[in-house]
Image: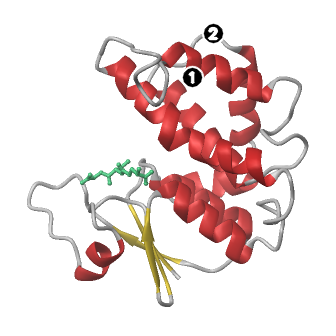
Amino acid sequence: MKLFWTPKTRSSRAVWLLEELGIDYDLESVDIRSDGREDSAEFRAASPMGKVPALVDGEVQMAESAAICLYLADRYGAGNLAPAIDDAARGWFLYWLMFTPAVIEPAMSEKYSKTEPHRGRNGWGDFDSMIATFESGLEGKTWILGDKFTAADVMLGSSVVFLRMFGMLPDSPLLEAYAERCLARPAYQKAMSLES
Ligand SMILES: N[C@@H](CCC(=O)N[C@@H](CS)C(=O)NCC(=O)O)C(=O)O
């Protein structure tokens, strides 16, 4: 299995998830920051948008961090990082797994670019309702589904770390504590150690 990756990007999520799984993988660096960027044909085949992360696993080629996390958790997690397909918890698991690309990231972009919010018109609502929803999802819980850490926490945990890194995390003891729990995970620390 090979992960196309660039340090300090959304690729970190996929590395974190691979470390949670404890399976073997190779990393191939993609220099997305260079001007005269020349992507390999293998990378382009897996990532039509030319974005990291991208994964090649045998005949499987794919990109999009949430899709990669879901694929890896289902395929290699033995039920540990994703509820089974017939488990009622699967509904909320999928909701929160997709919350990052569907809601958090567009809302961050809206805030960063100072675009006027349109809660009803925009699919992500707006930044403030995103934060309020994220907080209410975590209320009284260790992880987003309760006591059990899942791939959805990899997506949400990396988002909360990015929110903090960009100075966009409002005063939120709940989200701060969640970020600290994510940062303390050995798999997260191993993933970060590969970046420095
Ligand atoms: N929705 C995608 C976004 C991926 C993405 O935008 N990756 C950035 C790095 S964080 C990238 O590859 N940028 C280089 C480019 O677009 O050429 C995902 O979650 O995987």
Mark 2 CB within 8 Å of ligand 1: no
Residue 86 versus residue 121 in the image, above or below? below
Of 85 and 185, which appears nearest the observer?
A: 85
Mark 2 vs mark 1: which is more N-terminal?
A: 1
Identified by mark 2, the residue type is Asp
Residue 187 spot, x, y in % from top left: 70, 57
Whether label 2 touches label 1, CB < 8 Å = no
Whole-percent x, y for residue 76 in the image: 72, 76
Q: Indicate if the residue with disc 1 has its beta carbon within 8 Å of ligand 1.
A: no
* Residue 68 sits above or below residue 168 on the image: below
Residue 21: name its quadrant. Answer: bottom right
Residue 136 visible to the viewer: yes
| Distance of label 2 from label 1 (alpha carbons) | 14 Å
Whole-percent x and y of residue 72?
63, 70
Q: Which residue is mark 1?
A: 130
Q: Residue at left 71%, top 70%?
A: 74
Among all residues in the image, which is located at the extreme left? 36
| Camera-nearest residue between 74 and 8 | 74
SS for callout 2: loop
Q: Is residue 82 left or right of residue 48?
A: right
**Where residue 171 is drawn, which disc sits there?**
2
**Residue at 49% across, 22% down:** 125
Residue at 55% across, 37% down: 159
Q: Residue at x 65, y 49 (%)?
A: 154
Secondary structure state at the residue bearing disc 1: helix
Q: Which mark is residue 20?
A: none
Is residue 37 left or right of 40 when viewed as pictured?
Answer: left
Q: Residues within 10 Å of mark 2 (few under 14, many from 20)?
A: few
Residue type at mark 1 is: Met
